[in-house]
Image (cartoon, coloured by chain):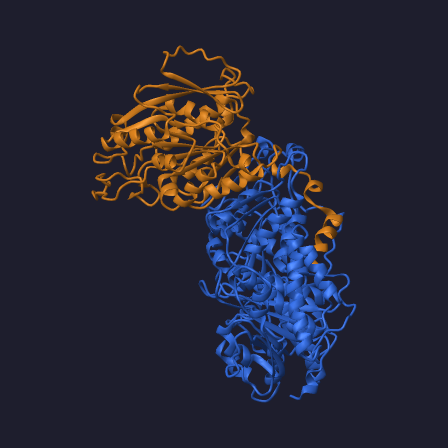
Chain colours: A blue, B orange
Amino acid sequence: MSKADLTRVNDFTIKIATVNGTGSASANALLMKSIFRSGIPVVGKNYFPSNIQGLPTWYEIRVTKDGYVARSGRVDIMVAMNAETYARDVKEVEPGGYLVYDSTWPRPSLLKREDISVLGVPLARLCNENFNGVRTRILMKNICYAGVLAALLDLDLAHIRQLLAETYAKKPQLVESNMKAIQLGYDYARANFQCPLPLHVSRMAQTAGHVMIDGNTAAALGCLFAGATVAAWYPITPSTSLMDAFKMFADRMRVDPATGRRNFAFIQAEDELAAVGMAIGAMWNGARAFTATSGPGISLMNEFLGLAYYAEVPVVIFDIQRVGPSTGMPTRTQQGDLLLCAYASHGDTRHVCLYPATPEECFYMAVQAFDLAERLQTPVLVLSDLDIGMNDWMCRDLKWDDNYRPDRGKMLGKEEVLKLERFYRFLDNDGDGIGYRTLPGVHPKAAYFTRGSGHTQYGAYTEDAADYQLVLDRLLKKWATAGRLVPRALIDATAGSPLGIVSLGSCDGAIREALDVLKQRGVALDYMRVRAFPFSEDVEKFLAAHELLFVVEQNRDAQLRALLTLETAVDKAKLRSLLHYNGLPISSQFIVEGVLAELQPGGRIASRDAAHG
Amino acid sequence: MTFIAKPKVAHPSLPKNALGLTRRDYEGALSTLCAGCGHDSITAAIVEACWGVGLEPQNLVKLSGIGCSSKTTAYFVSGGHGFNSVHGRMPAIAMGANAANRKLTYIGVSGDGDTLSIGLGQFCHAIRRNLNMLYIVENNGVYGLTKGQFSASADIGTRAKKGETNFQPPIDPVLLAMTLGASFVARSFSGDKQQLVPLIQAGFKHEGFALIDVLSPCVTFNDHEGSTKSYAYTREHYEPAVHADFIPLEREITVDYKEGEVLPVVLHDGSRIVLRKLDSAYDPTDRTLAAAQIQERMKAGEYLTGLLYLEPSQNEFHRVNSTPDAPLNSLPYELLSPGSKGLEKVLARYR
């Protein structure tokens, strides 16, 4: 690749290699936000270890004038701050790219590559000369590289100063020390390199009306706005930040200013079994309640999910998926829980699942999850993942309709119950498979018995074959109702192609980017993003209307494809899997290559597909 | 089976409580347990206790796990909601339900298998959280529904019906609860209604986690010679140490207690539990001494019974968490949502 190719404004990727626990997160956030505030779309992806301090960690900043949201799959500028990973970091840089490193200890042999430019900045020396204290020097070294990048990329120092002022509003002396570190790096770069680089930023106006937010924060906000009052959980990466965010927002916005009383209960449970049990108990008793977890937690929650399904208790569960099986790779992303969540627990069980693709959708789907759970009186699982949950995404502003009121579903109060001759919890009076529920404390006439053991439609214990089956069949009717209420798939059939892509969740960004690239190469594809289970009718139609469908998902076993073949009439043979499951977020390049390979005669996917039978 | 409804006709001369309700109003479905089961006596004691304190039936929330004991929540107070959950997980359901509505009265009925084996973790953590509920363990040392396996409360040397001897040390819910900081710890016997009824009433009123371990012989699988949880053995080795009388707010203390032997404990709503020491050496207000004495007597094969430890003014879950007096499930949505203005303010941080 010639240098000319790398003269790209607002379209490149920086990767920063550091050691975790050294405060690099603040430096990276500073860079991201200053670009964002210059009106330029930007994406941040964090590749961090399951460790507290001392292991390698990477942060990727993609500057993308076209507003793409996926991992780019390439590195144009590497900031190599971790000597331990120098070798692999250097290799990753695209030909014609740049490598910034701490030249306090020169490493000419290790960093040698003819086809990239190596920019050495004596960061440690600069910081040692200008700051006191070991910890401060380590932290400032990271802020200092942000200053170097500011000069190289032509970032606006005023934005950086403003961001620091906001971050350290209560500690103004930190604004000055941080700014000093920025300036040290900035001045060194200006004095020693040709600034800006051919890769740099230039002000745009594409970020107005947008925020940079992660999916866990957005989901937590959704829970707050949905009126959730009970949050129970057991800490597990990568779901913990959802609960932390809920607690933070609730502490700020749910405490009665007059009394100091907290209009929420936040319960750290002893394990995930207890966490989901508490959420179920609370929702059974009329509070909106939820829990957040990841794959290992869902495994434990299976027993309670079966109970909530059969006893018809609403509950909302967020599964921020990570790499499995077992403990897997806790800080890497995957869509590996699709089948587990859809059919969790023994016996005939099926669960409503929502599949958000962005933090924005996490917010709206969180609210929707509560409404659906109460309307359908059943668990609703929101399947996010680490990529959506923990990375910063540029999203349209979240909007709130002040006319919103929670849909509590079919719930009878005292007056309504008193009008009835007798109240029966599980009778299907309306033909939609959903009975009426009451809350404890209302009236003796409203009391009923909730159980996971066999029961009649009148709520009594039973071991009678017909009575048992009647209830189980009604649950199927309710499932059909769910299919009409869940969010529909998003379909883009503008290409009018016999070929299509089917996918879900966080693959969306990479797919939309891939569709653009493929179109430029003369391959036009339709696209359907499934947003919920059960599949709505439009899913069946889209599948039927296309000759060949690429099912793109982030797991090894083609779980979405399996669900589609189980739950729709689609011909298995026309579903071709593109499976990405190494723990990194999927990139558009993977999809483009996969599609093109298939479309060539004797494509590689045909053989893999055979293995899936 | 529970689908056999009891006739709801009540004789007009039946005594009525302050709410004008008779004991019949606190009954539930017909029990399906074995004739003579200790659990049925406990059910009767619960009915009596609820009637006695004048509990509004709809304000009682009945929770249980799985097992013979857990079935019993269907057999009392049919006017209250019941939740028969999964094995050993009743405390989690209770925690969530209580978090949602602090105003109701929560009773959990469990067994020794449900509490001390599969549910041991949840039992311990409910105590740590000082969840405001009455937790009754119907303790018979044996698994009934699966036909006679030892439970974790079986004593060393006790013999199963089929002849097998248990060599594993028992887990004692009373000592465990005391170690974990429980504020109300009692032991009783299903055959002693005089002792049990006021204990249940006191447990209802105690603000915080109240445990009553009730020795409740299993007539089918653990009532033979060689068992340490049979009716005969329990009667012989059962030693009331502290009697507790529950005195409602509106009633004067009229019982003539001997000086030095009574200790009235005032509860949050002004009602009182009057502790009467039957064993003058025993002190139900000193956790360390009480635990030592219970343990000592256990070594001698005796069960000390009564309200073995009581500590009022505990910080139950809602006090610790500063939740409002009004139940969380009753808060109007307007109070819970920050609205579009609130959202705008939040989003400013993400620009």
Quadrant where the image shows the N terminus of chain A: bottom right
What residue sits 60% from the left and 61% below the top? A389
- Measured as percent of width and height from the top left, residue A278 is found at 52, 45
Residue at far right of view: A205
Front in this rendered view, residue A308 or A163 = A163
- Measured as percent of width and height from the top left, residue A110 is found at 50, 81
- Measured as percent of width and height from the top left, residue A405 is found at 71, 46
Question: Does residue A290 lie above or below B324 as drawn?
Answer: below
Front in this rendered view, residue B79 or A90 = A90
What residue sits 26% from the left and 31% below the top? B296
Front in this rendered view, residue A42 or B32 = A42
Q: Quadrant of residue A602?
A: bottom right
Q: Is residue B153 left or right of residue B164?
A: right
Q: Is residue A497 left or right of residue A580?
A: right
Q: Quadrant of residue A4?
A: bottom right
Q: Is residue A160 left or right of residue A597?
A: right
- Measured as percent of width and height from the top left, residue A330 is found at 49, 63
Question: Does residue A21 lie above or below A230 as drawn?
Answer: below
Question: Does residue A203 lie above or below B116 as drawn?
Answer: below
Question: Does residue A187 lie above or below A410 as drawn?
Answer: below
Count all numbered tags in the image, as a single digit.
0
